[in-house]
Image (cartoon, rainbow, N blue to C red):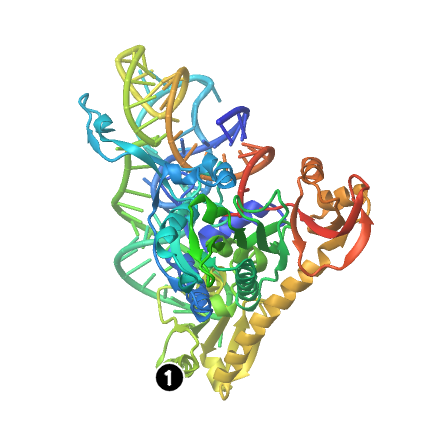
RNA sequence: CGGGAUGUAGCGCAGUCCGGUAGCGCACCUGUUUUGGGAACAGGGGGUCCCAGGUUCAAAUCCUGGUAUCCCGACCA
């Protein structure tokens, strides 16, 4: 074995880093906390972008682009917001370098100090709402439904590729509405789009819920989240959609005249998913052999390998299959590289997560068959050449379905109910996973539980049965269970 | 940002304690033989020993400072 992946059982976070590196998704860079997204990793992101972008457009949104830099004073306009983000901002203070008079390369030119410092956006609410103020006068200007694809910077203490990097790519939607109900409906609709994307494309089941006061976005009234359970029993916040109320409208004085000629503040939402989704994708499906990708997001869905090497007969069959699959809209590559042998190719494509491998050799052709291997279960089968294209097409769909079922089963097996604190703490300590338990609704209790178990309330599930109960920690009254887990 | 570890060829590492010719495996290049799950043999190329100072006749090795990565905590998408 030329490329070893640390087994998950031995060291889960090393396994994750090995996958990222050996599947060619990302590299470390010269800049602390920032990664280089490599072609294979970026191709996955491009597929995600294409699908989500279409969904946003189909629901009436348009794309725009706002500046990377935000005047420092903007950030402090919304009190909660500044509390949330001030600690992790990169700040631009000067606009010029000059040669060091002492001869040590370049120094910051002290004469080029900015009058007002700029921050690199950690999120764009402030710059966008300062702009919306000029764009909105009348109810006729509403709703304003804008999304942007951008990079943002959050100066985090500890980073991990895709899951938490100093700079990351994302989309952020920012909408303005005439009424409270319309804004809430918008944030819920986006929440649904995110959940559907996670399950239908990423094959990653998510729990839809609302964040507690403590966990919600700085400046939001409500934060809706999708939470996914990773293989190591930790929860990943995979996407959030915020109902912002009139907080930003008031901070940036964004008003409109309604149909009765009365001035009102507009109602707002914002919502985003990021390259973190790729981290979720890795940790939901992959195994000790490498990356496992759901067919709908795999940059390459099918690879055909001649065994042991290309020859005219094999080429003919392979090229016919390529043509047939392409006609079905399936991405496929016939790997005719003679410099590496079949076994090597098998391992490489498994590492990269290609969902289906078709191996064609002389002996297969004599029997009019090909060997078809699926990445998710690593099963191999001999399939008659007649109807092979249709077989592969169906197999891709089965793999997509199987990945979702498998991760749903995993989540089911790792979701527990706890009714006393000892049991609760024991589950989190020994198994991890989602723990559904009663909570008295106070931030104080939530923080205390976090201190004792390191688990936080991931969300209050939207679909939860209301049941009287007693808080797991304080014994105070509770009206329903909430979902706890250790989080990424 | 606190504690710990690491940084030597593209990758993984030995050498550092005890200063004295820069090494191993994989990868790479050339050739030959091979070929149904990461081929074998032979020959060959490749180094700012993380960076900057210092000590010394002499530094990968000792000292000081910086920097990057990983692990554990606090913070977070």
**Total number of numbered discs in the rendering:** 1
Q: What element carries label 1?
A: helix
Residue drawn where x is 75% and y is 52% of the image = A481
Q: In this view, does B72 lie above or below A409?
A: above
Residue A436: x and y in percent read 73, 52
In this image, A241 relative to A48: left or right? right
Name the residue: 23% across, 31% down: A112
Q: Is residue A407 visible?
A: yes
Residue position for label 1 = A316
One can see residue A25 in this view: no
Q: Where residue A27 appears, x then y in whole percent?
A: 40, 48
A432 or B39, which lies in front? A432
**For mark 1, does the 10 Å Cα neighbourhood hold few (<14), some (14 to 19), or many (20 or more) residues?**
few
Depth order, front residue of A416/A69: A69
**Quarter of the rendering containing residue B67:** top left
- Residue at image position (58%, 65%) is A199
Letter of the chain that mark 1 sits on in the rendering: A
Give the vertical position of B39 relative to A321 (above or below): above
Where does the image place residue A485, in percent across and percent down from the top left?
67, 48
Left or right: A51 as drawn, with respect to A383 = left
Q: Where is residue A327 in the image (x, y as percent from the top left)?
A: 40, 82
The outermost residue toward the bottom is A386
Answer with left or right where residue B8 lies relative to residue A297.
Answer: left
Residue A486 placement: quadrant: top right
């Amino acid at each position: 074995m030329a490329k070893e992946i640390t087994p998950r059982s031995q060291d889960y976070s090393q396994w994750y880093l090995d996958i990222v590196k050996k599947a060619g998704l990302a590299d470390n860079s010269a800049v602390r906390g920032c990664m280089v997204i490599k072609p294979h990793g970026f191709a996955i992101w491009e597929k995600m972008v294409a699908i989500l972008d279409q969904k946003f457009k189909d629901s009436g949104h348009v794309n725009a682009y706002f500046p990377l830099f935000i005047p420092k004073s903007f950030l402090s306009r919304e009190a909660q917001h500044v509390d949330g983000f001030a600690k992790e901002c990169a700040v631009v203070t000067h606009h010029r370098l000059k040669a060091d008079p002492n001869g040590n390369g370049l120094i910051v030119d002290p004469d080029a100090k900015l009058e007002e410092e700029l921050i690199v956006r950690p999120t764009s609410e402030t710059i966008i709402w300062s702009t919306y103020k000029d764009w909105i006068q009348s109810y006729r200007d509403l709703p304003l439904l804008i999304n942007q694809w951008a990079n943002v910077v959050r100066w985090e203490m500890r980073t991990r590729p895709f899951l938490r990097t100093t700079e990351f790519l994302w989309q952020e939607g920012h909408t303005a509405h005439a009424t409270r109900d319309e804004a809430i409906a918008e944030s819920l609709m986006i929440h649904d789009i995110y959940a559907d994307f996670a399950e239908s494309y990423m094959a990653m089941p998510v729990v839809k819920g609302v964040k507690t006061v403590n966990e919600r976005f700085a400046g939001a009234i409500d934060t809706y989240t999708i939470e996914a359970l990773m293989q190591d029993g930790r929860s990943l916040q995979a996407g959030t959609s915020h109902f912002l109320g009139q907080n930003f409208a008031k901070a940036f004085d964004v008003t409109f005249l309604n149909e009765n000629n009365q001035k009102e503040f507009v109602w707002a939402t914002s919502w985003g998913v990021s390259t973190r989704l790729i981290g979720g994708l890795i940790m939901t499906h992959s195994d000790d052999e490498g990356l496992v990708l759901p067919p709908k997001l795999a940059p390459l869905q099918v690879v055909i390998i001649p065994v042991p090497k290309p020859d005219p007969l094999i080429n003919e069959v392979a090229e016919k299959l390529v043509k047939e699959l392409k006609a079905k809209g399936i991405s496929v590559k016939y790997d005719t590289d003679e410099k590496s042998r079949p076994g090597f190719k098998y391992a490489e494509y498994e590492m990269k997560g290609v969902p289906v491998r078709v191996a064609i050799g002389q002996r297969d052709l004599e029997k009019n068959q090909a060997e078809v291997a699926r990445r998710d279960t690593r099963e191999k089968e001999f399939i008659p050449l007649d109807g092979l294209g249709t077989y592969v097409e169906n197999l891709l769909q089965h793999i997509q379905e199987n990945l979702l079922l498998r991760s749903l089963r995993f989540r089911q097996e790792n979701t527990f109910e706890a009714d006393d604190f000892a049991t609760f703490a024991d589950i989190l300590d020994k198994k991890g996973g989602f723990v559904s338990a009663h909570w008295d609704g106070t931030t104080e209790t939530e923080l205390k539980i976090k201190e004792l178990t390191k688990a936080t309330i991931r969300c209050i599930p939207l679909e939860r049965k209301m049941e009287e109960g007693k808080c797991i920690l304080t014994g105070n009254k509770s009206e329903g269970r909430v979902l706890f887990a250790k989080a990424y």
